[in-house]
Structures are given as C-alpha cells and as structure tokens.
Amino acid sequence: MSAPTKEIQATVDEEFGKRPLGKRLIGANTFWIALVLLALIAVFTAIAPAEFASLFTFQTLLIETSVLLVLSVGMTFVIITSGIDLSVGSVLIFSGMVAGKIMEALSPGGDASHAGWGVITVGLVAAVVAGTIWGLINGYLIAVANIPPLIVTLGTMGAALGASYLLNGGSDVRSVPTELNKTLGYGTSLGGIPNLVLVAVVITLIGAWLLHTTRFGRYTFAVGSNAEAARRSGIGVTKHLLKVYLLTGFLAGIAGFLSLAYYASTTISAHTNDNLNAISATVMGGTSLFGGVGSMLGTVIGVFIPAVLKKGFNITHVQDFWQMIAVGAVLIAAVWFDQRRRRKRNSR
C-alpha cells in the first residue's frame, strides 16, 4: 500500500471513527425512539399486566422478531450507504425454498422429515449461497452498472419471488427435517433462551461490531455521507457497495433458513411484506434514508416497536388495522425528525 493511500485512509478513519464508541453505538435519534418503545411497553403493561408483562409474552416477542432482525441488520448497512433493498423478503423466500428442495433431494423418497445434520448443513449452505448470489446481482447492477437501487431491487424482488414459485410449482415446501425444527426452530439453551433468538443476537452483535468499530463500517458511513467525496478520498466506492449488497443477500439467506427452521415450511405468504418491515424498522430506529447516519442499536429498537404494538393490540383485543396506522405514524415521525436534524446541521 502506498503512503498517500495510507494517509487518505487515516483521514477517513479519523473523520468517521473519532466519535466515542458509545455515541457511535447509540446513534443520533436512538434515545427518542427508545423512549417510544418504553412508553408502549408501559402502556400495555398498565392495561393488561397479567397478559402482557409475562415471560411467555416477551419470549414470544423475541422469537417473532428474530428473522426480521437478521434482515434488518443487512438493511441498516444498505440504507446508511443511501441505498435501498426491496428484494430481501423475496430473497429470504427463495433461499428457504432452495434449502428445502435440496434437503428433499438428498432424503430418501424426497421426504426430509427424518434427515440428519449432514443434510441440514447442506441445506444451510445452499440457503446462504442462494441469498449471496442475489446480493451479488443487486450489488453488480447498482455499483457497477450504475442502475438506481430502487429499480434494481424492485426488479430482483419480483424475479426472486417468481423463481421461488417456479422451484416448487407455486406451493410451499413442507417436508422439513424434524431435527431442525426441534433444535433451531423451537429449541432452547442458556437458561431457556430460544436458540433462534441466540442466533439473531449473535448476528446483530457481529453487525454492530462491523458497523461501529471496523474500517468497513467507517467506509459505509463515508459512502452514505457523500459518495463522490468518499471516492476522491481514495475509498473504492464501487467495491464497497458491492460488498454491502453481498452482505445483505448473505443475511437474507440466513434469515430464510431460520424461517424454514421455525415454521417447518417455506411459508411464502408470511414473508411478502418482510422487505417493507425491515426498511420500516431500520428507519424507525434512526437510520437516515438520506444516508450517512444510523446505528445497530437503533435498528434493534425499531424492530421491536411494531412487534410490541401487534402483541399489545392482540392482547387488548384492538383490531390489527390500528397497528398499521400506529406503525405508519411512528415511521413518518421518525423521517420528520431526521429531516429536522439534517436541516439544523446544514444551517450551522
């Protein structure tokens, strides 16, 4: 590496890594969105303390948000670069479908119910590879071909979903190893913590480490803040964007396998809105749609807001339609606060 390149990288590292680690982890708007989440928990606890404030309810919340959280980790990186990925839900479905079909193909009579961990491992690898390939396609078209992310991922969203239907004649794969469902889908460890939740937590922690403490994360913020300035500073913007979309596809592949383990089926209809849910959670958590701002902790909080609303409304017998209205209102408020913050910063 030449000396000028080292100096440029040192400048970028200083600019995007000089804030204390605590502030980088928390993010600009995380405090306010955390107050919203705490207020929701307090309200539902006051209304239905016996039903809502129970170990079972919170354990269910954690399980139900695990798959979405894995998707949202990847979405955080994408949106910080000022991009978008509408395809993650379809890629999740496709990855789960590929894993399911391969596990069936490797099982006697096409019934994967009694398959062992060798077949399950092959299924996991297949899901991850399938998701990563779609991430590569997105990254190449966006970073190399310079097609807008909205258009690229809108196209791959439909293509991945169509390919999923083609793989199994338009129906779900329902022959899933019982061992996978029993161990990863519903199994527990470490004092009763669901294994599905543990996997999601580990992935989130790795994502937080990658985003907030490494050069990859600093480059992500730099590209999102000003791609042209980042390019002139010596950052390989094209290469970095390709890596970000690869990472998002990789995580969507893992999410597809986790979903397969939990539902014991590909459940296509259950994931059609996962892309919008991941985007909403990331933005509600304080990640700016304009790029350059975000935190993994904020994304975690953003994932739980709609989950708490849904669970609370179900317990208090409020129609689900109100949940849609409430989530929409919180999302609009989050974007409004972000715009105010940006205007104040730019007026200085």
Image: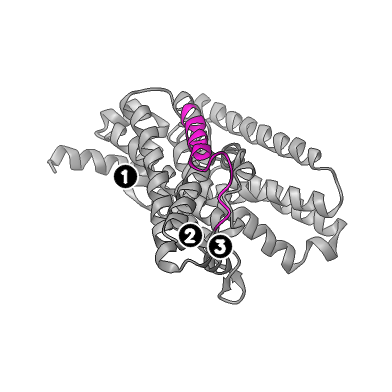
Q: Can you identify the residue that label 3 sits on?
A: 196
Q: Is there a contact, CB below 8 Å, between mark 3 and mark 2?
A: no
Residue under circle 2? 109
Q: Which secondary structure dominates the residues rendered in magenta? A: helix
Residue 13 seen in the current view:
yes
Label 2 environment density (alpha carbons within 10 Å; few <14, some 14–19, many ≥20): few
Give the amino acid type for the residue marked by disc 1 in the picture.
Asp
Q: Nearer the viewer, residue 294 or 11?
A: 294
Q: Earlier in the sequence, mark 3 or mark 2?
A: 2
Q: Which three-letter amino acid code belongs to the residue tagged 3?
A: Leu
- Give the Cα separation between the discs numbered 3 and 2: 29 Å
Nearest to the observer: residue 68 or residue 215 = 68
Q: Is residue 194 magenta?
A: no
Where residue 174 sits in the image (x, y, percent)?
58, 54
Cα gap from disc 1 to disc 2, whole angstroms: 56 Å
**In this picture, residue 215 sits left or right of residue 54:** left
**Badge 3, how many Cα within 10 Å: few under 14, some, many 20+?**
many
* Whether residue 133 is situated above or below residue 345 in the rendered picture: below
Q: Quadrant of the N terminus?
A: top left
Magenta residues, start to end: 155-175
Secondary structure state at the residue bearing disc 2: helix
Look at mark 1 in the image and give the residue it sits on.
13
